[in-house]
Amino acid sequence: MKKLILITALAAMIAFGQTNDTARTKKGPASQAHVLSRAEFDELLAKPDQILIIDVRRPDEVKDVGGFPVYLSIQINDLPNRLAWIPKDRTIIALSNHAARAGRAADILTKAGFKVAGAAGAQPYEADGGTLTKSWAPPPNPNAKKE
């Protein structure tokens, strides 16, 4: 009986491992975008009149992780429908937490004819010593009139 349980457990572990490998290979092709180093990102940030940061994260991710003081927030799934809002006279940096979504965004933008410097991840940028801006919603004022 113990042998049967052991064999069943081993078979389940093998099947689970194969499922995860299959799921990983079905993610699709990797982004063609260059992932910016902290030094490259900082060099671009030094020319704020020439760049545009497009942050493709959800607002809660920007609040929890941090970001940059000025950026255009367009979530990755909305990006193809928001291209008309994006100025073409600036170099674009696509931003996400670890640069995966940013890479996909950079590919979309490049294909649409935008000048894209590359993709960046907020968390690796901060881990390399870069400074992120933290934002939060102020707590409600208990003395405020309720309408």
Image: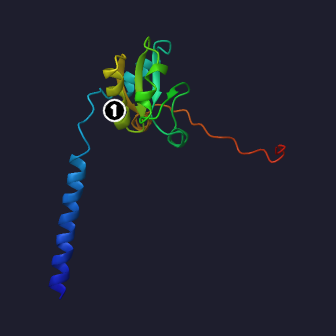
Specify whether 94 is left or right of 72: left
Residue 85 visible at all: yes
Q: Is residue 126 left or right of residue 69?
A: left
**In the image, is residue 29 above or below residue 90?**
below
Where, quadrant-wise, is the N terminus in this rendering? bottom left
Residue 36 seen = no
Q: How is the image coloured?
A: rainbow
Residue shown at the point (34%, 27%) measured from the top left: 108
State the image coordinates of residue 33 (x, y, percent, origin top left).
Answer: 29, 27
How many numbered markers are drawn? 1
Q: State the image coordinates of residue 100 (x, y, percent, origin top left).
A: 34, 37
Quarter of the view holding residue 44? top left
Q: Is residue 67 left or right of residue 109?
A: right
Up/down of 50 relative to 101, above or below: above
Residue 118: give x, y in percent of width and height: 34, 24
Q: Which residue is at a point 33% across and 31% down the rendered structure image?
A: 103
Question: Mark 1 Cα within 10 Å, few/some/many (few <14, many 20+)?
Answer: many
Left or right of residue 6, residue 57 in this image: right
Residue 68 spot, x, y in % from top left: 52, 29
Q: SS at mark 1?
A: helix
Q: Residue at x 46, y 12 (%)?
A: 50
**Where, by quadrant of the figure, is residue 39 drawn?**
top left
The C terminus lies in quadrant: top right
Which residue is nearer to you in this view: 129 or 94? 94
Say which residue label 1 marks: 104
Amino acid carrying mark 1 in the image: Arg
